[in-house]
Amino acid sequence: MESIVEELGKLKYSVALEISLEEIKPTYNAIYRELKNTRLNGFRPGKHPKGWLDKRFMSAMQKEAVKHIIPRYMDDALKEHSLRPVTVPVIQKIDFNRESPLSATLHFEIPPKLPPLDYGKILLERKDIEEVSAKDIAEELDALLQREEVLVPKDGVNAKVENDDWVLINFNGTIGGEEFVDSNANDMQIKIGGSDLAEFHAGLLGMSSGEEKEVEVELPERFGENAGKKANFKILLTEISTVKRPKMDEDFFKKYGVAGEDELKDKVGENIKSRKTAELQSEYRIAVRSQLSGLFDEFDLPEELVKFEQEQIDKDLEKAVSDKEISAEEKEKKRQEGYDNAKLDLRMKFILDSISGQEEMHFDENEAAREFVGLAQMTGQSPDKLIQSPFGRDMYQRIVVRKQGDATLDRVVARVFGDPIDQSVPVEQEHVHDKNCGHDHS
């Protein structure tokens, strides 16, 4: 195979491939044999209408070339010429017949080449991580216990509604004898003591399960045109519940993988410290990101990527107008804002990619895979099935881009502070299977 590269200007390149007859002939022959053995209705085995075989060969061979042959040889050509496309190479021309080489011309765009980042120009102040206090641990432990709380029926035959109880009610509201929007509900559960509809809550105090009552309430602003009007509510109280906080016993500690309260507090303290560390690192990233763009001169962006982003923005805005979420006038304003933001995002992407390449970073895709798997499981979906959908692939790619960006920003932070750099190459472990991954899915 021979390849010739031509620079077309502004990140655009052309690659002309020529696959010799010696290399391509076995493929020609295999496809021709398969077609020759095709049996057509009304014809004896091996017989076909005049010209049918040659015509079908051209069609079948072109399909094979586009799907398998050209991409394989194109990969080799790109490696040979040290080119990395950021757009999918598009076949502009393809030429072949059974007695000649196969040639093809493809066009694509490459990323802009940027100068090395001068880390000395990044302004960043190292901060100490806040110490974890006993108050922090107590508050976190209290929040943990709150998450484990459950509602249980209130004890006592004569149980009455009190503040902080939870009640299950049916109600019907009217204004001057007429129902209004949101005036009815069944099996609504509310906590007594809220500031919204305070008169309504006050009217429920002292009620027993099964009791009915009428309460007059002045409606707040969220009732729109009825705000400020007096409404009469007929209420049926069907259940009173109270919050039960879990006991910190052996079963509770076992659930959190600790032996006792002291060990739980230590674990909570470690979690708080990890969170504070992550929050400070995020603060560093934001500070670095806000400075990066200004440290590079203007540079060309791949036109096809810009065009793709603009088409996505147009598509989203058309849908928003169709769904009456925005007006036609708002669409034009949002379009320009979207176009500008898309270019800024692409600019930042290529800056981060350039830094990552110059640092020879190896991204651990296991982190992205673990996050994707976790999100899929949270929504009750199979990760392997979700990745097959356009939505799933887009979500996974967004996770990868974000994780790569964060890793690059972390590297810049480390360089600015003079911290040691971990140059180890991550070991492949986690994997989300998509149809192109090349793994055995059986």
Image: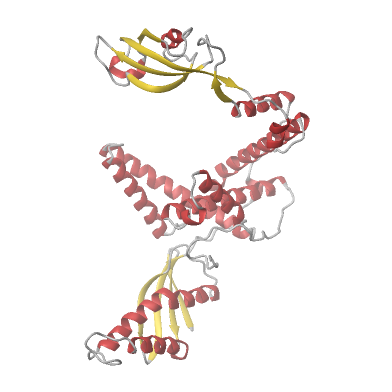
Among the 4 quarters of the image, the one containing residue 268: top right
Task: In the displayed orientation, state which residue is furthest to the front.
Answer: 157
Front residue of 328/172: it is 172
Would you identify the image quadrant in which residue 319 lies? top left
Residue 348 x/y as whole percent = 51, 50
**Can residue 297 be seen?**
no
| Front residue of this view, candidates 8 and 435 | 435
Up/down of 292 relative to 71, above or below: above
**In this picture, residue 344 sits left or right of residue 98:** right
Q: Is residue 113 left or right of residue 61?
A: right
* Circle count: 0
The picture places residue 72, in percent across and down from the top left corner, at 48, 76
The residue that appears at 29% across and 86% down in the rendered structure is 39
Q: Is residue 145 above or below residue 281?
A: above
- What's the image's color scheme? secondary structure
In the displayed structure, 255 sits above or below 388; it is above
Q: Where residue 183 sits: x, y (%)? A: 32, 18
Which residue is at the front of the view, 200 or 356?
Answer: 200
Point 25% across, 9% down: residue:
176
Q: Is residue 311 visible?
A: yes
* In-front residue for pair 226/350: 226
Above or below, comparing residue 215 to residue 127 in the picture: above
Position of residue 404 measured from the top left corner of the image (x, y, whole percent): 57, 52
